[in-house]
Structures are given as C-alpha cells and as structure tokens.
Image (cartoon, rainbow, N blue to C red):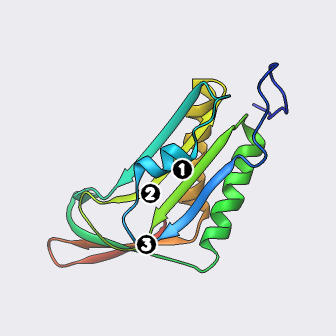
Amino acid sequence: MARTTNDHPGEQPAQDPIRLIAIRDTPLSVDEVFRAVGEDAAGGTALFVGTVRNHDGGADVDALGYLCHPSAEAEMRTVAEKVVAQFPVRALAAVHRVGDLAVGDIAVVVAVSCPHRGEAFEACRKLIDDLKHEVPIWKHQKFSDGTEEWVGAC
C-alpha cells in the first residue's frame, strides 16, 4: 500500500514517524518501544519481540552474542524509512541488542502504528524481516555440545 499524506480527514501524519531507532548493549524495554509508537491517529499498533530461544536447528542453545558493524544503526534507519514510505505509518520504533545474551533475553523489539490493524501488521512484519536481512548484525550461537556457530545477518 502506498503512503499518502492524508488518507482521511483528521489523520495528519506525524512530522517524523520514526520515533526510536537504537542499538544497545543493555536490556531492552518492550514498554519503551510501545510508548514510542503511541499515536492518537493510529487505530492499530503491532509490536514484535524477538527473544533468545533454547534451540536452533535441532541443537540446544546455551547462550549467544550479537555483534554489529558501526553502520548498523544508520542501516536500521534506512530500513525504517523504506517501511514508512511503503505503508501509512504514524509511528515506528526499532531497538536491537548487542553483546552477550542468555536464553529468554530480549534481542529485538520493533513496533509500528498505522491507521488500521492490517496495515500495522504488514508494516511491522516488513520492518522486522528487512532488519534481519539488511542490517549488519551478526549472531554467535553457543551450543550445549560445546560447538559454536556464526549466523550472517540476523
């Protein structure tokens, strides 16, 4: 769906719908991201939380670490700008964690607010999928059997 500047009377887009883009080495807050996308003109907000799971590819995962290229935050903003251009986004936020994480820790939180729920779901899915494929963040998994694996962009 193409973004329009005024789909319906009374629905003015925010000056900058990209409210929060960050890479942090400290625990992430779902509440912070949710608050960042609060918008009176939005009828739907979709939020995705990615956590460290205890397995991957049939192997037990003990822990993992994330590293990023110095350009990663700028690349996150570029991805966000593309989502804003493609969907009627009223507010968007994305935060990714780097460093060592344990099973159950939050690795990424993204959220998008749009006039309607369907648009919010689609925009949020596009945001997380493109972040995983385009932003230079790498995952180093440590398995219970002592083996390790680097995973390209996460």
The answer for how far apart the CA atoms under marks 1 and 3 are is: 16 Å
Q: Which mark is residue 108?
A: 2
The answer for how far apart the CA atoms under marks 2 and 3 are is: 9 Å
* Residue at x-position 71% and y-position 60%: 78
Q: Residue furthest top?
A: 9
Q: In which image quadrant can residue 39 be found?
A: top right
The answer for how far apart the CA atoms under marks 2 and 1 are is: 9 Å
Judged from the image, the secondary structure of the residue bearing numbered disc 1 is helix
Q: In which image quadrant can residue 71 be found?
A: bottom right
* Residue at x-position 57% and y-position 25%: 117
Judge the density around disc 1: few (<14), some (14-19), many (≥20) Cα neighbours within 10 Å: many
Q: Looking at the image, is mark 1 or mark 3 earlier in the sequence?
A: 3
Kind of residue indicated by mark 2: Val
Looking at the image, do the residues carrying marks 2 and 3 touch, with CB atoms under 8 Å apart?
no
Q: Is 91 in front, or is 127?
A: 91
In this view of the protein, can residue 154 be seen by the observer?
no
Q: Which mark is residue 128?
A: 1
* Residue at x-position 57% and y-position 57%: 131
Judged from the image, the secondary structure of the residue bearing numbered disc 3 is loop
Kind of residue indicated by mark 1: Ile
Q: In which image quadrant can residue 9 be found?
A: top right
Query: Where does the image place residue 72, in percent across and percent down from the top left?
Result: 60, 71
Residue 151 is left or right of residue 64, and the answer is right
Query: Where does the image place residue 103, in percent across and percent down from the top left?
Result: 23, 61
Judge the density around disc 2: few (<14), some (14-19), many (≥20) Cα neighbours within 10 Å: many
Query: Where does the image place residue 69, in percent across and percent down from the top left?
Result: 57, 79
Q: Which residue position is annotated with label 3? A: 98
* Residue at x-position 69% and y-position 46%: 83
* Of marks 1 and 3, the one in the foreground: 3
Q: Is 91 in front, or is 119?
A: 91
Looking at the image, do the residues carrying marks 2 and 1 touch, with CB atoms under 8 Å apart?
yes
* Of marks 2 and 1, the one in the foreground: 2
